[in-house]
Image: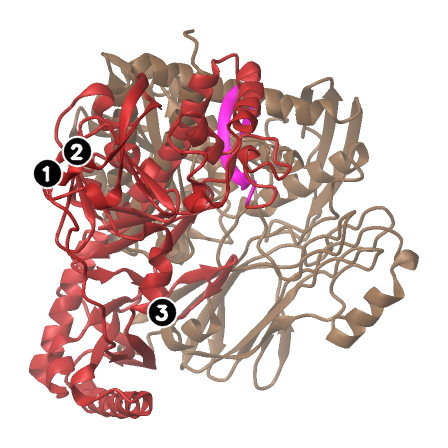
Chain colours: A red, B brown
Amino acid sequence: MVGIDMGGTSSDVSVVVDGRVGETSEGTIDGLPVRLPMIEIRTIGAGGGSVAHLAGQALRVGPRSAGSTPGPACYRKGGTEPAVTDANLFLGRIDPDAFLGGEMPLSTEAAQGAIGELAARLELSSDDTAQGIVDVANASMASAVRLSLFEKGADPTDFVLAPFGGAGGLHACAIARELEIDRIIFPATASTLSARGILNSDLRHDLLRSELLLAGPDAIAALQRIVDDLREDARALLDADGAGADERRIELSVDCRYRGQAYEIMTPWVSVTESGVVDAASLAALIDAFHTLHQEQYAHSAPDEAVEIVTVRAAAIGLLYRPEVRAPQSDDAEMTARTLGKRPIRLADGWHDTAICHRNSIGSQPVEGPLLIEEDYSVLLIAPGWTIRAIENGSLLATYVSNSRNGGAA
Amino acid sequence: MSTIDPVRQEVIRNALIAGAEEMNASIWRTARSTVVRETLDYSTALFDGKGRAVAQSTRIPIHLNSMSVCLEDIIAGPIPIDQWNDGDVILTNDPYSGGQHLPDFVAFKPVFADGRRVAIAAAIVHHVDVGGGAPGSYFANATEVYQEGLRLPPLKLVDGGKTNEAVIRIIRRNSREPEKIGGDVHAQLACLDVGAAAINRIVTRYGASMLEAAMDAILDQSEQTMRKVIANLPDGTYRFGDVVDDDGQNAVDLDVIASVEISGDMCRVDLSESADQAPGPVNCTLNMAKSAVYCALLSLGDGAVMANSGAYRPIEVTSRRGSITNCSAPAPVANRMATGHRIVTTVLGALAQAAPDKVPAAYYGVSYVLTLQAPDPLVADETRVYFEVEVGGWGGHPQGDGADGFSCGFHNLANSPIEMCEVLFPITFTEYGFIAGSGGDGEHRGGLGLAREWRLNADWGAVSGSFERFRHGPYGLAGGADGAPGRFVHYSEDKTVTLPSKISGVRLATGDRIRLETSGGGGWGDPAKRSDDARRRDRNAGYV
């Protein structure tokens, strides 16, 4: 799964493989290297507030952002340049009276004015300018996703897109098609998903001990000592957290590399996580796992070369209660009844009277796009060629079904 | 030329830059040697079908600017563009056929659509060793390019989809690190396919004609932006001279002199008055000189100019054949960066007369390449080669002090963490830090140079250095003082020897210490105008 958290000033791309979120110890914060384990995220300067402007003869979007103050022109807080949110409003994709659950009415005229001014300089129609702003933003987000996956040797077509943040739902279909991704998961409460995620996360302490060892029989005693120390420290921390015996997990992993390399691969040590015993067999299993990971990440491995152990890590995890996932709230029969009406929306090939419905009215039976789905703090745009249905955990699943108009972009 | 709307132009521009970045990630992911994986000494780019650089990854400016001139040379001579067929890869490392120095392999792959060549994917990679008189192919005593390693004229490494394995065997047989160079050559070839795939995606989506129109428009836009930058400078001819210490063989100053003529939105840079080419390996080919000049001029653009062949159009670079800035075969070139950096500081010095409010005083101006060969601390009877590039201080500038100990944009390489070095090599660091007082004084002082000192723990070691700025410190501007020059010192039990800046194979014994001091940057403005606050800060921090 590849997540795009699209907010006001930037979008964050993250990757989840086999249920595990990508981690790195080579991260940066504010341009400075930070060598601590953290979630691997690629941030690009494209969000709802990204400002569209003319660069030579080209239409450029971002990285400058109008932020929330002055914000996009339609906020009427002093912003005069058109932002991505202005383009979405102009194209009918955002309801000016339903923004932030109706708490912040947007000015369609202000958006029209800002886009009209840019359109005149571009010698394009306002329609094409607004669509162009969205197209450019989508293309740069798709590029960032492709690069994030490429660095892991992964193919986008094997992934499901998970858009969240306030603006993610409007752009997901177009970004997915740009990447030839066929499925999109729209999580519930997308606009606050990050906050909900941290509230539902388990407790976690990362402990590590660095010691350079050549992976071989001579290292077993030293490794057992390090593993014992780390597990003892981890248990003490979990005791202090009040995590019970069935509410905890201590996962061991080892940073390994071929001798002479300066980059390591964090290799899960499954056998020792389970048994706590370092012996010839568990060490051999670790080395095998490292060769496999190296092959996956770097497209080659060298089973005959010496392997070095640089750091042993223990993740002490205290499992927390997780609320039950919600079931779909309605069936397909109610769906049409709850349609909120229609409104003209500009899609890539022109204006269409498009059905609008509330998220709750989507059932397990697939509904065809084009369709606008409104929720309290976000809007989902389901482009032509896609269908959408609810799945067990309360998320909506969109599937690309046909090479219809515009190939499923919006 | 077909026209293109502003939206498609931008979308395709993004896709081209992303394609170059994917190539970049591909090399990083698959390369074997530390010079590629840690020092990140490689670059990637996408060209149009005519051979003009359009989009580049964010890597090493000196590489990136040089690839387009290299390609021009190849298609003007050895392999005309009409002989570039689908499935070919053209490779060279020959400085006298458009390359830089022998470790840098440049590879190009034409991409076809609708029966015509619409783009070329390109990558330059510094390979760990291509033979020659010293490990790493940095042979300080070379007097001819023949002593510097294997030289490959432009050739089709892949011909119609079929790889010429004989060439790969020759490359491996000539290297001290056959496994690593073999792996890195394959990584380089694979990244070209990644670039071709990126082009094919654009063609499938928008068509070949739209891609071509977008590339034309991107080049035109870079040209216009560069012309604006030049037009903002007052017309006139500005002369400046700087000095390369020596060529490692004779202690003779080597002048680098630039005459920069600004005329409307055109810039002509003539380097002909520079010294004659030297016996030692500090010579630059004209391509290298051009690349350095482009780098200096692009730095005036405040980041607004997208570096590509369009940006180079209003810049004309000439130099006298047989000079240190346009050397003739078979002059050796391994340490061409000594003069390359000097061309940058010389051209900037000239431009400071035209734009005194923009140009900083001189930065350290050298890639401090140090190698140590010593027994492997982990494996008996094996030796290892430690290779690092160190940096120094930046020049003070009209807006503030120069940065202390900071890599410059021209080579843009990462340093090696000392903790890692101590583990991998039989050395213990005894000092790493700023050198107090090494920045040139001025209203805005120069950045500080660095001292890096270690002790050898093994029985023996052999150290080599390719340095500069030991006799002539980086210049100050607008009344600022010069930065302090660097030093290279060998401490042994019974004596202390100050070594020259360019030397190969200094023999070390257990307990010997090696100390490298890099230059501080030049100061900017009258020192009398430096504020009391700034001076107090410097004193409190121990910077002076």
- Regarding residue B256, the answer to whether it shows in the image is no
| Residue B211 vertical position relative to residue A134 in the rendered view, above or below | above
Q: CA distance from mark 2 to mark 1?
A: 7 Å
Q: Position of residue A377 (x, y in %)?
A: 38, 47
Mark 3 or mark 2, earlier in chain:
3
Q: Residue at x 82, y 60 (%)?
A: B441
Quadrant where the C terminus of chain A sits is top left
**Which residue in the protein does label 2 denote?**
A336
Asked where in the image residue A54 lies, by quadrant, the reply is: top right
Are the residues under marks 3 and 2 on the same chain? yes
Of badges 3 and 1, the one in the foreground is 1
| Residue situated in front as seen by the camera: B104 or B529 | B529
Determine which residue is flagged by label 1: A333
* Residue type, label 2: Thr
* Residue at figure coordinates x 45%, y 69% from the top left: B462
Q: Is residue B517 magenta?
A: no
Report whether B213 appears left or right of A122: left
Q: Which amino acid, by three-letter code, is at mark 1?
A: Ala
Return the residue at label 3.
A37
What's the amino acid at mark 3? Pro
First to last magenta residue range: A52-67
Q: Is residue A126 visible?
A: yes
> Horizontal placement of A249 versus A12: left or right?
left
Residue at point 85% right, 50% down?
B525
**Which numbered circle lies on residue B467?**
none
Query: Quick one: SS at disc 2?
Result: helix
Near mark 2 (Cα within 10 A), the count class, few <14, some 14-19 or many ≥20, is some
User: What SS does tag 3 mark?
Assistant: loop
First reached walking from the N terminus: tag 3 or tag 1: 3
